[in-house]
Image (tube, helix red, strand yellow):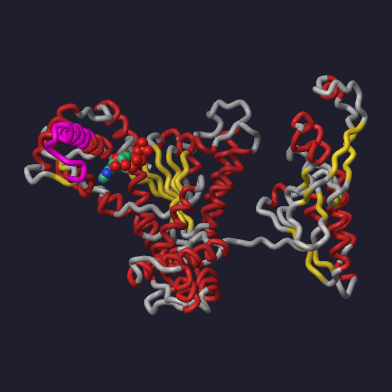
Amino acid sequence: MVCSPAYSSRAVYDRLLYRHFQTPRLVQEGDVLCVPTFGCAEFLDGNADKFLRWPELYFKVRKILGTEEGMQSEGYLADTQNTSLYLMAFAQAQQYRPCVLLLKDIEVLGRDRDRLGEDARVIATLRQLLLDGDPALSSHPVLVIGTTCKPQDVPTDVQTAFLHEVKIEALSEDQRRAMLSTLTATLPLGKEVSLAKLARRTAGFVLGDFCALLSHSSRAACTRIQALSFPGGLSEEVERDFCTAGFPVLEEDFIVALDQLHDAHSQAVGAPKIPSVSWQDVGGLHEVKKEILDTIQLPLEHPELLSLGLCRSGLLLYGPPGTGKTLLAKAVATTCTMTFLSVKGPELINMYVGQSEENVRNVFARARAAAPCIIFFDELDSLAPNRGRSGDSGGVMDRVVSQLLAELDGLHSSREVFVIGATNRPDLLDSALLRPGRFDKLVYVGVNEDRDSQLQVLSAITRKFKLDPSVNLSSILEECPAQLTGADIYSLCSDAMMCAVKRKVEWIEEGLDTESSALILTMEDFLQAAARLQPSVSEQELLRYKLIQQKFAAC
Ligand SMILES: Nc1ncnc2c1ncn2[C@@H]1O[C@H](COP(=O)(O)OP(=O)(O)OP(=O)(O)O)[C@@H](O)[C@H]1O
């Protein structure tokens, strides 16, 4: 905001100035700032000008940014330390009564410089200011509204000074629909655009996302029309006329925009996303598929079951690694157009006291915001081991398990959040987790033991590959070990793919092939890969899984 010749040209003063400028001051161009050097002995002793003890430095304010042209310029050097800014804001609000004073992100007000502790002086002032202006006492009130995304971080004294607290929840499908129809009221929409369908596909969206959706789809429509009608491009003038005249936004434009937004959303860490795994990508596992769909799709299609309290909200998939548990959960989420929040157990464990429980709470809160949503807990055994045996001195894991149980019990009221857990060791789980109403349905996902089921997996994986007509999938499997997990078959295919890539590179180098031609996998590639394939789950391990399966089947 403020530049002064010395500030910009003599970097040696930076630290001192930085500290000084953290106290807000109302400044104008031409003001001379006087910066005391008290307490900066080491800085002064070491300075290049050899001034031993300079009690004060002077700087002239040359320029203030962010002011309107023609107006007398004035600006603040802002900080979170001093209370004068708040005093000023409240005083200004009083002048314009009746008015609304909006304080954004109130959780940062009252934090000290490193944002870890609280500044009691600022908090006390803020509280006083909030309590002084009771709107009920005045006919021309100043209505103070504070906003925050982290209510738990707002200092208690500030929080209690507000009369009302309004929680803005995630939008329901009906609310999203209503918001869309208001926002698109003036927009020429194509006949086939269904706002109901859009509302269904925008779980978790908030107002800002909808505004982005509309601007992205308008841009997509503009690009589409330009590409169709003016392939040579448009002059600036014609383009302006064209935009003023307006153009209809079609369903395909919304789809393009939605894909862009979902992509951007999924890059945000920990954001729920709608996966793109279809049932065709999952080979075999028909029984398991049916079990999962009965648990999840049925209550979605027949909400009357929910009112009878007859639905399950949790399902546990267990079995050896690489058998397709994650893949199944993703396919279900895609089929039911639900968002999918994947969480690996160890990711939630944090060394700070209380943080792991907070992480568990956050996962469920995020899922509720993006409902209908499936939370997929991978490696559940590491998140919810048997209580009392976890061996950690502070009992962190016990508290995490308790938090998880509390959240699972709370799911019945939210209805549209389902939980799928996956584990290789269900015997290590806390038994309370498997009680009715929690993960009460256990489904074993085993290795593919017969060639038929292996063939289904191999066909599903090679669906997107280009295969030579000589390739016979059944004969390939004859060359493989008898028991294979889905991941083993996947590694067979990726090995075969590597063989094909190597061959293609050699051919390109010899001038026999070009980069633009498609990569074709031959029978020879698969046979080479099959000869090297080692099953990832040993006989002994399989036996152990069989015993576990028997134990749980008997429960
Ligand atoms: N039935 C299947 N059909 C098609 N592909 C499969 C199948 N099972 C596994 N795969 C392949 O194996 C890979 C690994 O599977 P996935 O991650 O779902 O296993 P998992 O059981 O969740 O393993 P883990 O217990 O180690 O987490 C998948 O990405 C997929 O390519």
Residue 56 visible? The answer is yes
Would you say residue 508 sits in the magenta stretch? yes
Left or right position of 516 against 400: left
> Between residues 214 and 548, which one lies in front from this camera angle?
214
Left or right position of 255 against 60: left
Chain part drawn in magenta: 495-517
Where is residue 357 shown, x and y percent of the image? 60, 41
Q: What residue is rendered at 63% in x and 29% in y?
A: 394
> Between residues 39 and 87, which one lies in front from this camera angle?
39
Image quarter where the C terminus lies is top left
Quarter of the view holding residue 117: top right
Where is residue 150 shown, x and y percent of the image? 67, 50
Left or right position of 195 against 403: left
Where is residue 277 shown, x and y percent of the image? 33, 52
**Quadrant of the rendered image holding ligand 1:** top left
Going by the picture, which residue comes out furthest to the left? Answer: 470
> Between residues 430 and 202, which one lies in front from this camera angle?
202
Would you say residue 454 sits in the magenta stretch? no
Q: What residue is rendered at 17% in x and 35% in y?
A: 508
Where is residue 181 shown, x and y percent of the image? 51, 75
Q: Is residue 361 above or below residue 382?
A: below
Q: Is residue 409 above or below residue 16?
A: below
